[in-house]
């Protein structure tokens, strides 16, 4: 049971760190197009596309959380 709690806590912490870090990088790299060529400013919001990257990222975070939990329990 101790291993399970160590895994869950490390997984949640790593997940939040990755999500906040990704959000900061995306916000930092965003450059709005304030002056369009034709003067037509669209009111449509685009959120990007769907890919398999979030699943791979979650699997990577879970793997890292597993190794962190193993280190914490052995210590």
Image: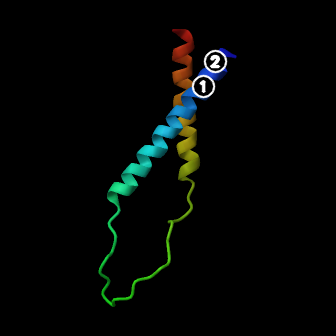
Residue 23, given in percent of the width and then of the height, sits at 43, 51
In the rendered image, which quarter is residue 9 located in?
top right
Alpha carbon distance from label 2 to label 1: 6 Å
In the rendered image, which quarter is residue 59 located in?
top right
Q: On the image, numbered disc 2 is attached to which residue?
A: 3
74 relative to 35 in the view: left or right: right
Q: On the image, numbered disc 1 is attached to which residue?
A: 7
Q: Residue furthest right?
A: 1
From what the image shows, is residue 14 above or below residue 7? below
Whether residues under marks 2 and 1 lie with C-beta atoms below 8 angstroms apart, the answer is yes
Which part of the image, by quadrant, shows the N terminus? top right
Residue 49, given in percent of the width and then of the height, sits at 53, 65
From what the image shows, is residue 75 above or below residue 10? above
20 relative to 50 in the view: left or right: left
| 4 or 56, nearer to the observer | 4
Residue drawn at x 46%, y 38% as measured from the top left: 17
In the rendered image, which quarter is residue 8 located in?
top right
Residue 37, given in percent of the width and then of the height, sits at 30, 87
Q: Secondary structure at mark 2?
A: helix
Q: Secondary structure at mark 1?
A: helix
Which class describes the residues within 10 Å of circle 1: few (<14), some (14-19), or many (20+)? many
Residue 65, given in percent of the width and then of the height, sits at 54, 28
Residue drawn at x 51%, y 66% as measured from the top left: 47
From what the image shows, is residue 19 above or below residue 68? below
Which class describes the residues within 10 Å of circle 2: few (<14), some (14-19), or many (20+)? some
């Amino acid at each position: 049971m101790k291993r399970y709690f160590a895994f869950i806590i490390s997984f949640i912490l790593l997940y939040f760190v990755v999500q906040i870090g990704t959000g900061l990088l995306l916000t930092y790299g965003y450059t709005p197009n304030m002056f369009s060529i034709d003067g037509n400013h669209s009111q449509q919001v685009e959120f990007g596309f769907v890919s398999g990257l979030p699943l791979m990222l979650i699997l990577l975070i879970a793997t890292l959380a597993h190794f962190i939990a193993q280190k914490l329990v052995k210590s």
